[in-house]
Amino acid sequence: MSNTDHSQAIQDAVQTALTDKTTLNIQGGNTKQFYGRRIQGRPLDVSVHRGIVSYEPTELVLTARCGTALREIEQALDKHNQMLPFEPPHFGDTATLGGAVASGLSGPRRPYSGAVRDNVLGVKIINGKGQILSFGGEVMKNVAGYDASRLMAGAMGTLGILLEVSIKVLPKPATEITIARSADAAQAIQLMTEWTGQYLPVSATYHDGKELYIRLSGNNKAIESAKRIIGSDSVDWSDMFWYNLREQANSFFMDDLPLWRLSLPAATTPLQLQGDVVMEWDGGLRWLKSSATADNIRSLVNAAGGHAILFRNGDRDSDIFNPLSAGLLNIHKNLKQAFDPQGIFNPQRLYAEF
Amino acid sequence: MNQASKPVPDQDIALRLAQRLGAVLPAESLLSSAEELRPYECDGLSAYRRLPLMVALPETTEQVQHILRVCRELEVPVVARGAGTGLSGGALPLENGLLLSLTKFNRILEIDAHNHCARVQPGVRNLAISEAVAAHNLYYAPDPSSQIACSIGGNVAENSGGVHCLKYGLTVHNIMALEIVTIDGEVLSLGSRALDSAGYDLLALMTGSEGMLGVITEITVKLLPNPERAQVLLAAFDDVQKAGDAVATLIGAGIIPAGLEMMDNPAIRAAEDFVHAGYPVDAAAILLCELDGTNDEVSIEIKRVRDVLLKAGATEVRTAENDQQRASFWAGRKSAFPAVGRISPDYYCMDGTIPRKHIAHVLKRISELSEECGLQVANVFHAGDGNLHPLILYDANTPGELEKAEDFGAKILELSIEVGGTITGEHGVGIEKINQMCVQFSSDELTQFHAIKAAFDPYGLLNPGKAVPTLHRCAEFGAMHVHGGKLPHPELPRF
């Protein structure tokens, strides 16, 4: 596909929707339609608005149109030995930068080099009045105006259509290896808590119930000393292992049961949940396969200071995202109104109320 | 300085406010006489001064709730203030408004060493957090130069940076949760000790919102383990361009230093005279490059950085051999502002951020502008992230010099926008850069900002007149300020 600027066509489509009083279902590579609440609306394909607008390795910034394939971006970065710090899951070959930002999903490296929102420097959007607006920019530090750029990360397209995103990129580590240790869930959490309290070059962790896998990144010396502290030898299938985890392609995720994404304070001891659990992010991210009720799961997770998302499968017309307090819901509705007064963008994809 | 409008405070409102607030606040927590109000007349941007109608010093969230409810009912604007070290006039009082000081919120409530975070009140000083958690081998990363004095609540309101941002991020990257009170007196809890939360990223939106959306009453900060070792190099250059290029070369080589600072010759001389750090006073520019990590890691990286800097044309590269030397290398940089304060009766500190590749061009333009207006400038610079702090030297007692300095500053900010940067990297817009917001943003974008504010504060009572200009103001500013031959906002009626 050619690199082209379709912002005018997208703006026209928004104007038409405003005139027709129809709602829009914004689609990029269509790889994350499974995520969020089921919605109605006229499909608006924004994947045609694509192409890297600028990339200067020494500035550590890349700006691309929303429809640019993540794969294309990663290839461009790879040529300069750089990477997207948040290691976004693709969930399909056609995944786009816009979708990665709108869904706000980050991969295994998230606790160590930041989430999507941490690495968004600026956005160009179309708001619900059909206006093209730019916030943030291409520099690392920018406090002019409210931080509307980071607000777009994880908003599931409900506040506007992303046209362009400027993102911070990072050099790839010199070396990466994976080591493994046997541990049950409680031991794994304890070990990870100990390690995160020290300065170690850990860049991913995964606990599958029995084994704890640790990815180390950096120069050889740093990795060797970390191996001594953690007390384990390397296993040799590093890249594929973490790729399969990021893409949910390992055997744990091959299942039709409702899959819950639990975000918790990392040191939380194992919760008494019905179903199988695996952990990432030093214990901060836990995946639960379970047919237990949402209330049952959320009561335990909320009490531990976390939130639970019905990530895949299950009832897509139910509360997919953790319900908000009345005060927060009110602010959310006001913000939706501020960006999209007629409610045309992805209505109810995030919450039934807006 | 622009003459602020001076509405006569409504005595009746003042009385009613005093009565209503007095019902919950002890007498010593409400200040209203001129001598009591005086210490609150300005923040770190002392060129702007104004007395508030009254100062309230609450010490509980309930008191803040009550104060905000009363202010909403009486339609009294509220300006929140932390330690008052801000550099953009964000905490400048309003004559008809309440100044809400959060200095009594000065407790560290909880240290959660397992989840590497601490829950603190907004009046806690930035450095006090790292001191309190040092026993756990942890620290709070953002380190603005004013960290001895500035409060964490103010850091959140401004999204403060520091010298370690390139590697460790800004305030927004280092906080996990906030408790805020809305203008309706409602307590909201944003974020959590988990790495993300349900719904919109209100934590990001609140960070850097300059007291316009809510009053922060509690902050959970992220803590990091202390690196095993930190070491700093000092590289001297005989040419500013070479120093600027060396920054790009370092980053292009895949090195992300913990800190990467640049000073030009006037700044080097001022700092050297002040703290005797041993800086090379004949250098056109110096770079300070700090590396941290494990012992082994730093040993390797130090050699690499040294090689890169020498290849990039450094005339000399020194490595701090011990902590004392490291401290002395940094002392010059950290005291650059007061050092410049010694050589000039007054100075005006700018805060633009630019893409790093334009460092040399921007410094050259600044020196041309300096000659044109006849005011000297010293440049101190977070080179790693392109955040420039030109210090314009002037004498407020010489008629017309302040105006000249302001005009010079405005030109630097517009130059930052021109090369693709921003008018403020870490100091905030406040009242100081409000006109330049009209240059950086379109009227549609400013309108969107006003809509965001209204989502939290529909009455416009929280810090009104700061951070985001009204379109009316931009039209007036545009009328007197033609930029590049074009009036900003040509679509607006002129008044």
Image (cartoon, rainbow, N blue to C red):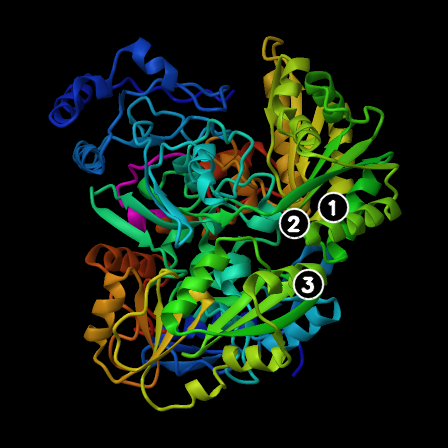
Spatial CA span between label 1 and label 2: 9 Å
Who is closer to the viewer here, B13 or B285? B285
Q: Which of pointers 1 and 2 lies earlier in the amino acid sequence?
A: 1
Q: Tell me if residue A225 comes above or below residue B397 in the rendering.
A: below
Which residue lies at the image location 65% right of the left edge and 30% below the top edge?
A: B327
Image coordinates for residue B374, horizontal then vertical, percent: 74, 19
Spatial CA span between label 1 and label 3: 16 Å
Disc 1 and disc 2 on one polypeptide chain = yes
Image coordinates for residue B288, horizontal then vertical, percent: 72, 37
Q: Is residue A337 visible?
A: yes
Which residue lies at the image location 31% right of the left edge and 66% below the top edge?
A: A307
| Residue on which the image places disc 3 | A54
Q: Secondary structure at mark 1?
A: helix
Q: Which quarter of the rendered picture does the C terminus of chain A lie within?
A: bottom left
Category of crowding for the residue at label 2, using alpha-carbon neighbours closer than 10 angstroms: few (below 14), some (14–19), many (at least 20): some
| Residue on which the image places disc 2 | B420
Category of crowding for the residue at label 3, using alpha-carbon neighbours closer than 10 angstroms: few (below 14), some (14–19), many (at least 20): few
Q: Is residue B419 left or right of residue B117?
A: right
Q: Residue B457 magenta-drawn?
A: yes
| Residue on which the image places disc 1 | B358
Disc 1 and disc 3 on one polypeptide chain = no
